[in-house]
Image (spheres, rainbow, N blue to C red):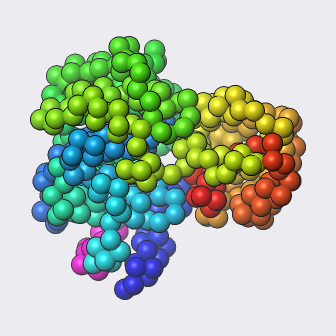
Amino acid sequence: MTYKETLDWMFVQLPMYQQKGAAAMNAKLDNIIHFASILDNPEKQFKSIHVAGTNGKGSSSHMLASILQEAGYRVGLYTSPHLKDFRERIKINGQVVSEEFVVDFIEQHKPFLEYHKLSFFEMTVGMAFQYFAQEQVDIAIIEVGLGGRLDSTNIIIPEVSLITNIGLDHTQFLGDTLEKIALEKAGIIKPKVPVVVSETQPETKMIFNLIAHQLKSDIVFADENAKEGFKTDLLGDYQEKNMNGVVATIQQLKGFTVSEQNITEGLQKVVANTGLLGRWQILQQSPLVVCDTAHNKEGLQLVLRQVERQSYGQLHIVLGFVNDKDVKSVLGMFPKEATYYFVRPAIPRGMDVNVLWELAQEQGLEGEKFGSVQKGFDAALQNGQSTDMVYVGGSTFVVAEVV
């Protein structure tokens, strides 16, 4: 198969949570454990840091990778979802996995994958772990896909576990309270492996303390004794919380030599070192065009505060969501004085633009509907004056179509 044919097979023939939602979920680790054994357990052949959380885990993972690269290490990075190319999910020192490796891996294991009906995410985790083992990385940063306890990445025994924060997202899978979701995220804590929590929350602190104590794991709440003065090239005030957790994680990492200069330079060169996209990413200056992948209530609250602090004549917002979000409550946070361009991301679970428009009307948000993200984005650019601001967001998949 060609690379494109391989991706088509992965995306279409097998369930994929990002495309199909609940139908793609497989809430147990049996498949990935079996697959890992077939691959000769590559997850045991490299050291790792495991990163979970509702918001900030992607940014934090990229910060960690950048810092360790600055310290001279060969660093694997596994994240999800991708924005433009599947290979963004699997990188070593900022370089994406080759098309040849993806094709060869799927061709070699296709009979097993088909027979055991592995999900898109399960096969991708196996692919990443095999690649990192084969390329003999010094350490890999592994981002959880969804939750923690039953996530396919949770077969690793990391050097440190990092939990960024807890918010009400994916409640149909993880629970409808912060406490229930915290229990799922805390599933990545391993016996005697230190755990860092980026953001202390009253509802979840006791749960993390209890589980860490049961497992004899040292626990650090990074914001309670944060070291100030660090800056990052990732824009957005919300990165401050992520930096606290990242720095504390590096401090808990044993067996690696990382200087304060490595931390400083790594935080300031995240984009250059890792190729991260979509976090308060400025696409142009006149008018100011910013996109951000924040897609749940907690994440959007932080991003919308950042929008409020910008200087602009008129605010234009290109907005789309997926079906499994509590869009009605989220829309109430958006500014009513903005001009809206309602769109649907081009995936099966993208929210119908007519439904979105009606929900927005109920919240007093005025704007037009467009047949695609690109058409809405083009209209916003056409209407925007040089002193205006265009914000693109609501879903990772909306951002993916404009970056």
Q: Residue at 18% of width from left, 62% of height from top?
A: 135
* Position of 180 relative to 320 (above/below): above
Task: Give whichever of 85, 201 is nearer the camera.
Answer: 85
Q: Is residue 369 magenta?
A: no
Residue 361 left/right relative to 240: right
Total count of labels: 0
- The residue lying at 16 percent from left, 35 percent from top is 257
| Residue 353 shows in this picture | no
- Image quadrant holding the C terminus, namely bottom right
Image location (x, y in percent) of residue 192: 15, 28
Front-most of residues 32 and 246: 246
Return the x and y of residue 171 as percentages of the image width and height: 52, 38
Q: Is residue 107 magenta?
A: yes
Asked if residue 330 lies left or right of residue 6, the reply is right
Q: In this view, does 326 lie above or below 145?
A: above
Report whether 383 appears left or right of 136: right
Residue ID at (35%, 32%): 264
Which region shows up in magenta? 105-117
Quarter where residue 230 is shown: top left
The quadrant holding residue 279 is top right
Quarter placement of the N terminus: bottom left
